[in-house]
Image (cartoon, helix red, strand yellow):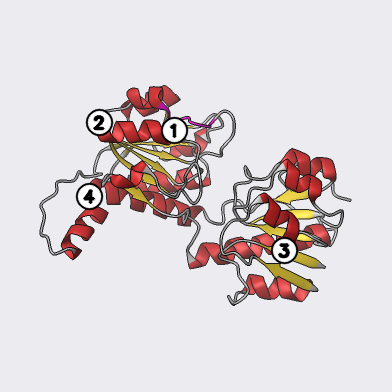
Amino acid sequence: MKILVTPTSFHRDKKSKAKDLLEQFADEIVYNPYGRPLNEDEIVHLLEGVDGYIAGLDYITARVIEQAPETLKVISRYGAGYDRVDVKAAAKKGIVVTNTPEVNSQSVAELAFGLMLCLARRIPALDGKVKAGEWPRMTGIELYKKTLGVVGLGAVGKRVAMMAKGFSMDILAYDPYIDRTFARDKGIKEATFEELIGNSDFISLHLPLNESTRNIIDEKAIEKMKQGAVIINTSRGGLIDEKAAYRALKSGKLGGLGLDAFEKEPPGESPLFELNNVVATPHAGAHTAEAIENMGMLAVRNLIDVLSGKECKHVVNNMIFS
């Protein structure tokens, strides 16, 4: 078996149980030689003769699928999201797509809450000024008894909500498929999207990117928000209209923006980076030692299960593998 592995945190020189398991199974492993998510041409080139593909944040388009070798039987996403994989094209070609749900939810939730605290207390701006020899007085805000709107009450959203409970925050949640039992038991109020954005001091996004969620935070949505509202996105770039957010941050309509995901990744130069009420991280939500090990192990197990003809519980494109 020849396997392609592209996640940047799952590389040749790193020792892990997941890597050991994969090496025991595979005859040949091809690792990402670029240290970043791959483009279409790079993926197609590296897929030559490959039976299984453990995929990071690469864009696996219909073109990639069409040009993939007939040997390719499984794309095992290293992460919960699979919006960057054309799952319909994969199913049409007989390629199983799997993911690793929930194993990185604690890691992502902690980063989301960390970004919230950084913006509330202006920690990065204060850090920079102190290190530059200044001793500033910059006023922040408390999270205590503020209202947090959680957009998407899935595995990550639930954990963020429970962290917020420790700060005595009021929690609003919008999710078309909301777990009402969880919300009721944890004292979380179900809200419409309009109610949530209009009444929240902090808004944390935990959504997949699709046609219904793209630019869900646009100029019209921002206009309906509280003055000085803070938005956190640790999910997917494309959920926020970055140009509209920039204008709102400049005007003071938005009080802060925490981004771990961008419309373009890496984002390169962005006017957002001119602002000290923007905190940015490089899609690092799942980058903890624990999450990396858990994602790696489940991604490898999913791949081995499919290639061995066993049942895999984490198939996302609803196809029968036989």
Q: Residues in magenta?
A: 213-218
> Circles 1 and 2: CB distance less than 8 Å?
no
Q: Would residue 16 appear left or right of 98 to someone viewing this image?
A: left
Query: Mark 1 = which residue?
Result: 241
- Tell me residue 13's x, y (percent): 59, 77
Amino acid carrying label 3: it is Leu
- At label 1, the amino acid type is Asp
Dividing the picture into quadrants, the one containing residue 22 is: bottom right
Q: Mark 4 or mark 1, which is nearer the start of the sequence?
A: 4
Q: CA distance from mark 4 to mark 2?
A: 20 Å
**Who comes first in sequence, dot 4 or dot 2?**
4
Question: In 3D space, how far apart are the residues under numbered discs 4 and 3 (Cα atoms)?
Answer: 43 Å
Amino acid type, residue under disc 2 in the picture: Ser
Which of label 4 and label 2 is nearer to you?
Answer: 2
Q: The N terminus lies in which quarter of the figure?
A: bottom right
The majority secondary structure of the magenta stretch comes to: loop
Q: How much space separates mark 1 and mark 2, taking CA atoms?
A: 16 Å
Q: Indicate the secondary structure of the residue bearing disc 4.
A: helix
Q: Is residue 298 magenta?
A: no
Pointer 3: what residue? 4
Say if 185 sits above or below 30 in the image: above
Which mark is on residue 251? 2
Dot placed on the residue nearer the N-terminal end, 3 or 2: 3
Residue that label 4 marks:
121
Residue 252 is situated, as x and y percent measured from the top left of the image, at 24, 32
